[in-house]
Image (cartoon, rainbow, N blue to C red):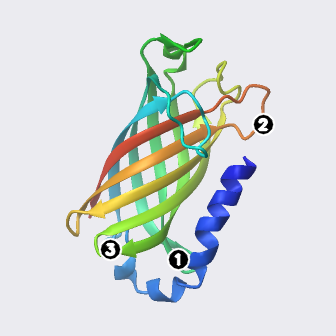
Amino acid sequence: MKKITAFLLLLILPNISLARDYVLPDRNPFMGTYQEQIAFGIGQGFDTGILLPPPVKPVPFYIGTFQYSQPTSFFRIPARRSINVSMTLGLDEARGWRWQDFTIPMAYLTEDIALFRFNRLYAGVGAGAGLQAEENARIGSKLIFQFKVMFGYNLSKKWALELFIQHFSNANTAEENNSYAFYGLGATYNF
């Protein structure tokens, strides 16, 4: 958890001085001038739940996500607030876990912050909190916290693609906290 917090601070702090460049609403890299966004994403699970160092051992565990967002700002840095509904899907046993036992729906609120924008490319980080439908042996509570790092490419004013690394855990609020990690691809539509 300390590594993730330090990583997020290192990414955000240098960009606060650039906030004045993002005051105009058309400068929001996530949404441009649009006021609403929907996104769909899919991801491949990895056996380690931490983001640093990046996970490298894929397992038969997947995620599908629907996200509804609106633009906002975080200390004048462009951002988006989102309502997310996700479903994890475990298909088999691997590395000592019965991944099918972790097929669980989740709902959570997030805020993503744009770190930089260069032409059509952008990068951001996000954090959020929510609930999974049931406790399990991997995350021993219904309460979950989410961290996300994303890289996006605006195909047009309305469409974008995003690559992401996503982490879910209970932030040590319960005894079991083996967490989930996913690499994924998403598509966003602004309207």
**Amino acid marked by disc 3:** Gly
Q: Residue at x 52, y 51 (%)?
A: 148
Residue under numbered circle 3: 32
Q: Say which label, 3 or 2, has the lower sequence index.
A: 3
Answer yes or no: is residue 30 visible: no
Residue under numbered circle 2: 173
Residue under numbered circle 1: 77
Distance between mark 2 and mark 1 Cα atoms: 30 Å
Q: Say which label, 2 or 1, has the lower sequence index.
A: 1
In this orientation, which residue lies closer to the viewer: 86 or 187? 187
Q: Position of residue 176 (x, y in %)?
A: 74, 25
Q: Residue at x 62, y 40 (%)?
A: 50
Q: Residue at x 43, y 40 (%)?
A: 183
**Dots 2 and 1: beta carbons under 8 Å?**
no
Asked which secondary structure carries label 3, the reply is: loop
**Dots 3 and 2: beta carbons under 8 Å?**
no
Q: Position of residue 166 (x, y in %)?
A: 51, 44
Q: Position of residue 144 (x, y in %)?
A: 64, 38
Distance between mark 3 and mark 1 Cα atoms: 13 Å
In this orientation, which residue lies closer to the viewer: 80 or 47? 47
Asked which secondary structure carries label 1, the reply is: strand
Residue 109's disc number: none
- Mark 1 is surrounded, within 10 Å at the Cα level, by few (under 14), some (14 to 19) or many (20 or more) other residues, namely many
Q: Residue at x 22, y 70 (%)?
A: 157
